[in-house]
Amino acid sequence: MWIFSEVICLKFFTGKDATDLPGITDYTWLRLYAETGTDLLKWKTEKHFTSWLGLAPGQHRSGKLNKNRNRKYRPKAGQIFRQLAQSLIESKKIALGAFGRRLKVKRGSGIAVKATARKLAVLYWRLMVKGLDYTERGIKAYEEKMKLNQERWLTKTAKNLGYQLVEYHPII
C-alpha cells in the first residue's frame, strides 16, 4: 500500500505517468525516479541522457580506438533499462519486443538488449521532459510497417537494376 501511495504522489507531482510505457511498472518507475531525480532537463537531449546511462552505441568500428575501455561509472538507471529491455524482448505482445527480437537475430542478444533499452530510455526522457504521450500500437502494426519497408526497398532495388516487380497470384 505504501508503494501505491508513492506512485500516486509521483503522478501528482510530475503530471506524467511513466507506467504507460511498455515494461515500466510502478516499482520500476520508482527505481528510475530515485536514480535520475526530478529534473531530467540536466541532460540537454535524449542523446545526452542515453550516453549517461551507458546505452549509446559504441564507436570502435575502425579498430583504432580502445575497444576494452571500461567506464568508471555505470549508473544503476542504465541497468534498470537493460532489465526492462530483456523482459520486453521475451514478451510476445509488445512492438518494442518485436524490434528487440528482430535485432537479436541480426546482431546478437547483447546489442539487441542495449538497443531496446536505449529506445525505452528515449521514450522515458521524451515523456518526462517534453510530455509526449506513448501509445502502444501493437505487434501487428509493427510487422505491417516492417513489411511495407521491405516492399519499398525491394521495389527501389528492382528499379535500380532495371527490373519491374509484378504481383504474383497463384492459380488454385
Image: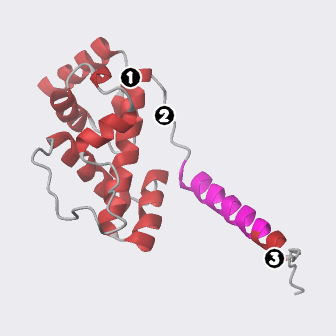
Q: Cβ–Cβ below 8 Å for labels 2 and 3?
A: no
Q: Position of residue 139 (x, y in %)?
A: 54, 55
Residue under the point 23% across and 19% down: 38
Foreground tag (2 vs 3): 3
Left or right of 3 in this view: 62: right
Marks 2, 1: nearer the viewer: 1
Q: At 25% across and 33% down in the image, what residue appears?
A: 29
Kindly report the secondary structure that dominates the magenta region of the rendered protein. Answer: helix
Q: CA distance from mark 3 to mark 1?
A: 46 Å
Residue 31, x across and y down, in percent: 17, 34
Question: Is the residue marked by circle 2 packed among few (<14), some (14-19), or many (20+) residues within 10 Å?
Answer: some
Disc nearer the start of the sequence (2/1): 1
Q: Is residue 52 found left or right of 94 in the rendered image?
A: left
**Which disc, if any, is residue 129?**
1
Up/down of 122 relative to 152, above or below: above
Q: Is residue 141 magenta?
A: yes
Residue linked to disc 2: 134
Magenta range is 138-156
Counting from the top left corner in percent of width and height, residue 117 is at 33, 49
Amino acid on which the number 1 mark rests in the picture: Val
Q: Farthest residue in the top direction?
A: 13
Q: Position of residue 158 (x, y in %)?
A: 80, 73
